[in-house]
Image (cartoon, rainbow, N blue to C red):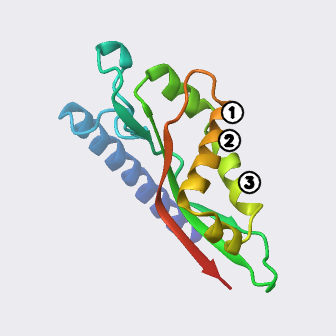
Amino acid sequence: MGSRFNKFLGFVVFLLLVAIIALTAVAVVKNHAVPGVGIERKIERPVDASKGKFGKDVQYNLIGKMWIQLKEGSDKKKSTLIVSPWLEYKEDRTFYEEMDRKHGQIKSIISGFFSARTMDELQAMGDETMKMELTGKINEILVMGKIDKILFNDFQFLVE
């Protein structure tokens, strides 16, 4: 009895493999399936600066949403900052590639800047002062150009 069942299972597996191979072949022949298409991550990149769009302001927005644990205040409450930074700069392909290479360092600078301060310190600092300090710190590591300003899509405090 076990032998018949094993033969039946083997036959079912064989039929499934044949069906998968046949369906894949049909999809490739009818151009519904193109190997390698759709598996890469699509990222909007600035237009090549060599094509004449010099001086246009563009934004580097690949940093994403960051959750940063802030320093505890005098009230001993823990707080977290949710922030989505964007960097604005004059369009330049080489500078964009430098920022892309230094993506991790830029995130580290932003995280370090906020985690070294309490929620009260950040609120007292004011938006413009905070943005100017952060812009300066990020520009210190950049060689091919400088960012003009930093913008925040999200800027929200969570208090425990």
Residue 151 lies, in percent from the top left, at 47, 51
Label 3 vs label 2: CA separation? 11 Å
Q: Position of residue 147 (x, y in %)?
A: 52, 35
142 relative to 19 in the view: left or right? right
Q: For the point 50% across and 43% down, which residue is it?
A: 149
Position of the C terminus, as image quadrant, is bottom right
Tell me, for residue 137, which label it has, or none: 2
Q: Mark 3 sits on what residue?
A: 112
Depth check: 101 or 133 in front? 133
Q: Amino acid at mark 3?
A: Gly
- In front: 22, or 108? 108
Q: Residue at x 74, y 80 (%)?
A: 78
Q: Quadrant of residue 42?
A: top left
The amino acid pointed to by label 1 is Glu
Mark 1 residue element: helix
- Give the SS element for disc 3: helix
Of the image marks 1 and 3, the number of the one nearer the N terminus: 3
Are there few (<14), some (14-19), or many (20+) residues within 10 Å of tag 3? some
Circle 1/circle 3 CB separation < 8 Å = no
Mark 1 or 3, closer to the camera: 1
Mark 1, residue position? 140
Q: Position of residue 9 (x, y in %)?
A: 48, 62
- The N terminus lies in which quarter of the figure? bottom right
Number of on-image labels: 3
Q: Are marks 3 and 2 in contact (CB under 8 Å)?
A: no
The mark closer to the camera, 3 or 2, is: 2
- At label 2, counting other C-alpha atoms closer than 10 Å, the crowd grade (few under 14, some 14-19, many 20 or more) is some
Instruction: Tell me if mark 1 has few (under 14), some (14-19) or many (20+) residues whose alpha carbon lies within 10 angstroms of its own.
Output: few
CB contact under 8 Å: marks 2 and 1 = yes
